[in-house]
Image: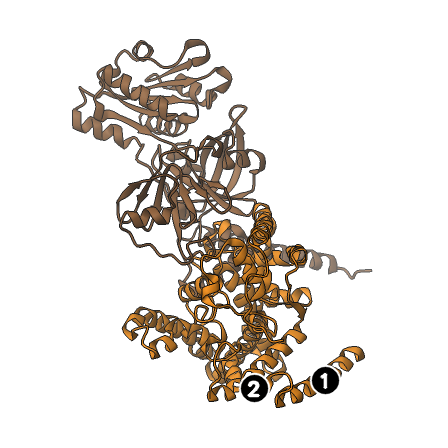
Amino acid sequence: MDMQTRSLSLMTREELDSFGAELDDLRHEIMADLGQRDADYIRSIVRRHKYTEIAGRSLIHFSLTPFSWMAGVGLLSLSKILENMEIGHNVLHGQYDWMNDPELNSRSYEWDIVCDAESWRKYHNYEHHTFTNIIGKDRDYGYGLLRLSKDEPWRPWHLTQFGNYVALSVLFEWGVALHELEIDNIKNGTVKPKDKLPFLKRFVDKTSHQLGKDYILFPLLAGPFAPKVFAANLIANLNRNLWTSTIIFCGHFTEDAQTFLPEECEDESRGQWYYRQLLGSSNFTGSRWLHIMSGHLSYQIEHHMFPDLPAHRYPEIAARVEDICRRYGVPYNTDTFLNQYKTVVTRILKHSVPDSLTEPGGALDKVGSAVNRVLGKFLGQRTAAS
Amino acid sequence: MFKAGTLPLIATGYHAIQAMAHTVEVSVTTLHERIKDAPGILPPGLLGSYLNFLLCEIDPRLNQARVPAVVESVIEETESVRTYVLRPARRWGRFEAGQYTRIEVDIDGVRVSRNYSMSCSPAKLDKNRCISITVKQVEGGKVSNWMAEHCEVGDIVHLATAQGEFTLDNFRRAQERFGIARIKAPLFVAAGSGITPIMSMLESRLHADPMADTHLAFFVRNEREVIFANRLKQLAEEHAGFQLDLVYTDSEGLVSKEKLFELVPDIEQRSVHICGPQGFMTLVTDEATALGVVPEAIFIESFGAAVPASALSLDAKATLSFASSGGSIESEGGKTLLELAEAAGLKPKFGCRSGICKECLCEKASGPVFNRLTGEINSEPGVHVQACISVPIGQVAIVGW
């Protein structure tokens, strides 16, 4: 049964309270344990980010063969992803504020993407993390472009939403940067364009800095070889866009990630908040470096429960969070990266057509399950073969 | 084996290489020193931050973004007091005798800072490129205990520019204002580790004028607790104008009006410079005034030891002051920084108001706050706290509001 918007009343008030208390205890335990190890970890990641960037840019600038140029692009992409996911995103959440180091402080850190940090803190840390997956309040939900739940009525333009999704992924950092503009709210008149002027100023400042750096300064430094540097930066930024959007879609838009209605989240207790974060998020499994490259958003559930705990701690506490969830009989959504991503694509496709077609027994349901069978078989064989 | 003449050739070659290596070494060392002491040679922005990153990777002493200082030696003064001789990068600048500096250390991943007075005269910096600070281990003191247990020769700490008004300028200005007849010389009154800025001023004054009339009344528990015992005795031997009075409070009792008058009969003709615990300074101020000292010629240095967390009560009356707007507000029972600021008519940024999003993060200059979410008490100066869940439980100052 498709139940993307589910009632939060599966647990009693008392159960929710003790569920919340157990998670609070876990949080306090880790908070009290933070120290040198965490400082060393994030500084080692910063070091890797800087060295890969220096190596990547040097290769791009001075390489004489396409292969070393490609290696440079690869290193620069790697560096940009590390900076964006494991450093930028997590530092801006205040995960390392306790270190009292201005270079790793959420107030002063500015990351290497076109979205300015202030805008991000407001719209991501506050809106998205407080109102996660509440339809109408969490504007991250489908980014106003995608229909991902039956709660939103189907419109003909949803037919092309897979194309929209691809376009959003390609231009992901621009989508993130323009998020604060609230185009949808300007269109429906709830927000005046004039109120967005301060944001537009910050937007122009940050984007001109980013564009100037990647597409003017660095290419010019290469003199006659400017085009190859320009292209390398473009590809590295594209790689990062595709990677980050894929990771983020796997965190909230998998098949079982739920959505909520504003009225059921009024006067929410701490336990209810934790529970909603759990239901609205999904994890994926993988190697240590997959986790690091995803900024540990592969532990989206833990990240949403404890957004200000240093992310590299999530793997340590995941087993305990899962255990708490099991004891309270609530679902803990986790699977391999590939399986989770498959459900994301399925969900986007499924909601692009009227619900009557995808309901059990509907025309597309039959086609869909057939495709799934074939795809499953194919992927299954490949896994078996390797 | 070798043809005649080969050996001398090898020897010459060896010496040439050695000489070259030496030249390279000298120029690298010179370059190293140049960079270390350079006053802000880095370009601003991204390029500068990458260059500085590389410099720090080569040697943390080359850090251009902060002022590193190397611990040159550690001197045990008493059982619980140590003097750290530090060699700061030249761009740290100069200091006035009696001033203090903020020293930053990393303790278990956390950058913590404290103010310590320089305990040497500025002449020492000119001569040896070194300064010294003197730290007393305080019970429960995060930095002082860490320093005692972990700080070793060769370690790097970071310093902020010297500041402070508790200097010899006070005496000079008081003398100009009230005349030499009214204020002929300074009297220094110290208790315990309050001697540190005074030591700096004594050495500086006597260095500039070896015969200068200078009086020190130093209150300590007993003989074992005398910080700088040798330096003080040596000063007294070398300078006829310097009178040293050590008062052991264990046997002679605490400071009193009679005691002060007995030690310094000409006290009313002096400016009085006091450093020690707050209670001590208040007491000496009152008594000196009663003995006829010009009130405007009494100067104190409150070197604020952090209040231990156990001494704070959650019901304590609290005051919140705002550095930018200049206002302040009294706390009414357990209200958060955010609620208080709003009650005072300010409009600080906020988001979730429940400790999740950190939109309301503000910089606390000083004072203790209670974290509603974690139950922790934070008394650290210069840290960021979440305004929506932090309850002031003392005198709290916020920067930027």
- Which residue lies at the image location 36% right of the left edge and 71% below the top edge? A205
- Residue tagged by mark 2? A356
- Residue tagged by mark 1? A373
Q: Chain of mark 2?
A: A
Q: Chain of mark 1?
A: A
Q: Real-space Cα distance between discs 2 and 1? A: 22 Å
Image quadrant assignment for residue A43: bottom right
Say whether disc 2 or disc 1 marks the residue closer to the N-terminus: 2
List x then y, in percent, for residue A326.
68, 58
**Is residue B222 depicted above or below B362 in this figure?**
above
List x then y, in percent, for residue B277.
39, 25
Residues behind callouts 2 and 1 on a single chain: yes
Q: Amino acid at mark 1?
A: Arg
Disc sitting over residue A71 in the figure: none
List x then y, in percent, for residue A332.
64, 63
Number of on-image labels: 2
List x then y, in percent, for residue A149.
53, 77
In the drawing, does residue B249 fall left or right of residue B241? right
Mark 2, secondary structure of its residue = helix
Give A111 or B124, whichever is nearer the viewer: A111
Q: Quick one: which chain is orange? A: A
From where the camera sits, is residue B47 visible? no
**Is residue B11 depicted above or below A284 in this figure?**
above
In the drawing, does residue A320 fall left or right of residue B202? right
- Which residue lies at the image location 26% right of the left edge and 44% below the top edge? B327
Residue with the most extreme right position: B1
Chain B image colour: brown
Q: Amino acid at mark 2?
A: Ser
